[in-house]
Amino acid sequence: MSEAGTELLSIVAATLRLSAPLVLAALGGLFSERSGIIDIGLEAKMLGSAFASAAVASVTGSAWAGLGAGIAAAVLLALLHAFAAVTQRGDQVVTGMALNILVAGLAPVLATAWFHLDGTTPALPESARFGELALPGATALAELPFFGPVYVRVISGHNGILYFAALAIPLATLALSRTRFGLRLRAVGENPDAVDTAGISVAWLRYRALVITGVLCGLAGAYLSMAAGAGFTRNMTAGRGYLALAALIFGRWRPAPTALACLLFAFADAAQTRLQGVALPIAGVIPVELVSALPYALTVLLLAGFVGVSRAPRALGIPYPANR
Amino acid sequence: MSAAAPAVELRSIEKHFGLVHANRSVSLSLAPGTIHGLIGENGAGKSTLAHILYGTVRPDAGEIRVGGRPIAIHSPRDAMAAGIGMVHQHFMLVETMTVLENLMLGQERGPTLGAGVAAARATLAATARSHDAGLNPDAPVESLSVGQKQRVEIMKALHRGAEILILDEPTAVLTPIEVEALFVELRALARAGKTILLVTHKLKEVMAITDVVTVMRQGAVVAERETKRTTLAELAALMIGRTPRPPSKTPASLGPPILEVDAVSVFDAESIKRVDGVSFQVMTGEIVGIAGVAGNGQAELIEALVGMRAVGAGAIRIAGTDVTMLSVSARRRQGLGHIAEDRLRLGAISTFTATENALLGRQDDADCCHRGLLRRSAVIGTLEEWMRAYDIRPPEPNRRLALFSGGNQQKLVVARELERRPAVLIAGQPTRGVDVGAAELIHERLLALRARGAGILLVSADLDEIRLLSDRILVMCAGRIAGEVDAAADERRLSLLMAGAEAA
Amino acid sequence: MTRAITLRRRVEPALIPLINLAAALVLSAIVVLAAGSDPVEAMVVLARGAAGDRASLGYTLYYATNFILTGLAVALPFHAGVFNIGGEGQAYIGGLLASLVCLFIGPAIGWPAIPLAVLAAAAGGALWALVPAWLFVTRGSHVVITTIMFNFIASAVMTFLIVNVLIAPGQSSPESVAFPVTVWMPSLGALLGPSPLNLTFPLALVLAAAVSILLRASRRGFELRAAGANPEAARAAGISTGAATILALMLGGAIAGLVAVNELMGAQHRLLLDFPAGYGFMGIAVALMGRNRPLGICLAALFFGALYQGGTELSFEMPKVTRDIVVVIEGLTVLFCGALENLFRARIARWLGREMVA
């Protein structure tokens, strides 16, 4: 395999790794937003899960226990969001921001209190993390001329959660288009009145949507602290929640395009460190700091309508009045 | 009439909304297989009653019986279980989903959609009519016409097993042809044994289609009649509570044209031509009425005249000055006034106080603003005068507008626009949602403005109002002026023009 | 009976935020407990740290200045119906322009560069708010998302500039050369010091008063509020809602830009990385707690300033409770004063003896 080829493969592999938490969080946001609830708080759910899973994994030594705790934490936060947005009919943007700020402070406080380190959890040993899974036939196929390295470096050898993230994309698509829940979910995000007069509870639908958001963000957060990293550190989500939201808008609130947008953003991230100091054909040397702004700039361009139009669910962000 | 048990009975229904007594001990009985009309003015309580029957509103007291058995209706689910279906005034459709998906909503028949799709297709086949030729089940609802969307709403109710069908102001958005199609449908449903409750304030339709009619006024039932044994005039008198008193109208003394509309065409957001080469003039001292079923371009025409929508072609002149390119505020400075059709959306801001609403549209005027600062005490002073002159209650300038009744809100908006002494006033539905007393006062004031030499363009779906006030009437249909008639013209000729059946 | 009710009704506007705040504090106390410390002791340390001596008070007011500015930066656009989450980026870019004036024009003309730099800071913030505003008005792009994106873009751009272009030569830490003394914002440290309290504090108070007059008594303010309350009705009344929105956001951005005056010209006397440090986001909490009214914002800013200053003290004296507890209190405040503000409203209304208008 040539030098450039190996380099390319390693970028692709890195892209996949970086995209996993984004895809999960973005799909999570998709469910809540399709139901009509704006979710700026993806950051909080991921961070909360990252902390909870790392904390529990550290104490119990079990990665699975950590995963369970992470999902539970994210679901709890999602329920809080649902309570404020659906039951209390409060401002959804404010709720999301409040949760982001709250968890950003709460996690380090608890971490310091329980582990006596400065706002982090102890580093997790390999046994308490999610390691790489070799897909069947990896060793046997490794020698094949072209397909072999691709299979070994890019497709096999990833984390279980990442494979789940890949699976989640078609699952989400099917759920939305082929199930009763999906039909009702799509309806309630466009016209809650239609759902209400059909005798279906708008609030219950939205609560369930947010629980799904919690589960998916929980997986994303657990990935960050137990698979990609080895423990929780302050602000480790580093804006991924907002990036996921941007990908969701990019993907027009549909699972497959959203996942593609996540891949695009992850690619920018993966390429950035490798492009450092490398002169590109037209642009010359792009400063690494500016490359990191690329996903955000792209999103703004999209929102400005320069890269097509993105239409949000019509009832997005509007509290549904209980008119009893 | 058969002696069978009534399909639906409402007994002594009471409902308060805060201080408003919306339903006072209302009792209603619907015989099976009949079309029963429920009429009343805006605010009479008929919509409330319909919503109570469908479970979206809970009564304070009273009983509901279906097929002789008392049932409790706490939600639409209960109503549907009892066989009651409702076609709402504002459609309950998900625009981006297909006809099939809309039918299936709530009737999915299982966690995956296979069975639900089959059931929906079956209903579609069973309820198919000859005029459904264009109804594609897999088309998104947003591509359908208004009449077709209503068909889908009726099919939805039938798909959910409705034996009793409530229709709330169904003809408000339909063209005359679509209204006929609806009536054909309703007669067929009644023959098949369904019971239909038609809630409306359109007396002609009630006379045309119903078997029995109940009249409500101010929350109470005032009369019930067999349709073939009553007349339109009797129903009107019962609805209003007295014979209507037309305002005195002096003969018109016309001056030069104050508003000239010259071959104006207006396109909407999807580049569909909504106003097609319309030309007319309003002279000083006259009221020109524009009649027509809502949705024929009147709203877009008003927006173009006022300055809220760009003109695609043609010119608009006020007192000879070309204003086609001018902004809303510039046109207001030229002497244009505007009573908006939709008060709560366009005419007023409900979270603002009465004083702040009195400023709306006047914030640039010299009497309201000096060097960028508002002249609050001056504005309050004028408002207090208006409150006396127009009988706006309660006379509290700092009260939030939402706390005033609809009639008083409208009186404030009318006062604001009229007292500015505009040279030309565009009045859209000036008495919509307003009680009779306030409507009479507004009519008087409009005629007074006319006598003082202003030109008024009156756009209303209320034909009676148009005929009462206008000196001449233009009929708008499909974006064009279909014809012009004299105020005393034949009702029939007007209807034909409105239906597009006769050319100018 | 009626007089009692009238008295209670006067109290109501202040009552709800206070009760929401109390709820936030109660929950924070629980968090402190969970962290293994004494909440009462923590409160005492906080209070003492915030106002225990003149220097502490000076610091409290210095922090409050930033909060007044970012609070106004959120509240003013809010009245016009838009949510300005871009305070961080607006402050950052304001800092860029102010620093350029201080570094390159300051040495030439001396103290007259101060008002120039203040204007530059405002202009920087206004410019950074202009693009999202313009995109919103012309393209319908969601302001919340674009302003968040612009925060990140500002961060990336400023990091690049500070690390590569403006960094003081021979330095390893990402800071610019120190500003010449002549362009330092006059200090009020003599009154309440030693502290970084400077002239920006009274400037912020004057701005709060100006915003109040703008909103309540001016024609522009009326247009702004109308555009926010009901854009269609405003348009029908001849108000240009697009212009009103852009004006509101630019003013908000300009005010946020002035954080740079307080931080860079008043306290740090140089440009450094990440100086907005979360003040922009906290502005949301301040605006919510102050119910978007300038007076309320000043009071809320005072509270948050005290929290910040007290929090530093707290992290010295009670190492188990880190500075992050301040962030927790902020988060809970935003939650209760913002999203859950109606949680207690029904009970309060009943106590006030009046029927609620739905």
Image: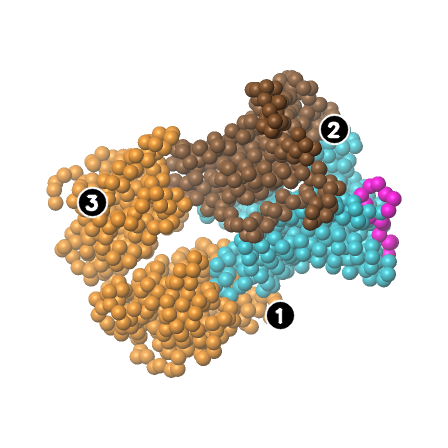
Chain colours: A brown, B orange, C cyan
Is the Cβ of the residue at disc 1 closer than 8 Å to that at disc 3?
A: no
Q: Which is in the foreground here, disc 1 or disc 2?
A: 2
Q: Find numbered disc 2 in the image and state the secondary structure of the residue it sits on.
A: loop
Looking at the rendered structure, the kind of residue marked 2 is: Asp
Please report the residue visible at 65 percent of the width from the left and 52 percent of the height from the top. C73
State which quadrant residue A229 falls in. top right
Mark closest to the chain's N terminus, 1 or 3: 3
* Place of residue B149 in the rendered image (x, y in percent of width and height, measured from the top left): 32, 49
In the displayed structure, A170 sits above or below A190; it is above
In the displayed structure, B258 sits above or below A84; it is below
* Residue B13 appears in the figure: no
Q: Which is in the foreground here, disc 2 or disc 3?
A: 3
Query: The residue marked by circle 3 belongs to what chain?
Result: B
Residue at numbered disc 1: B371
In magenta, the rendered stretch is C169-182
C-alpha span from label 1 to label 3: 67 Å
Residue at numbered disc 3: B189
Please report the residue visible at 64 percent of the width from the left and 40 percent of the height from the top. A268
Query: The residue marked by circle 1 belongs to what chain?
Result: B
Give residue B415's mark. none
Q: Find numbered disc 3 in the image and state the secondary structure of the residue it sits on.
A: helix
Residue at numbered disc 2: A118
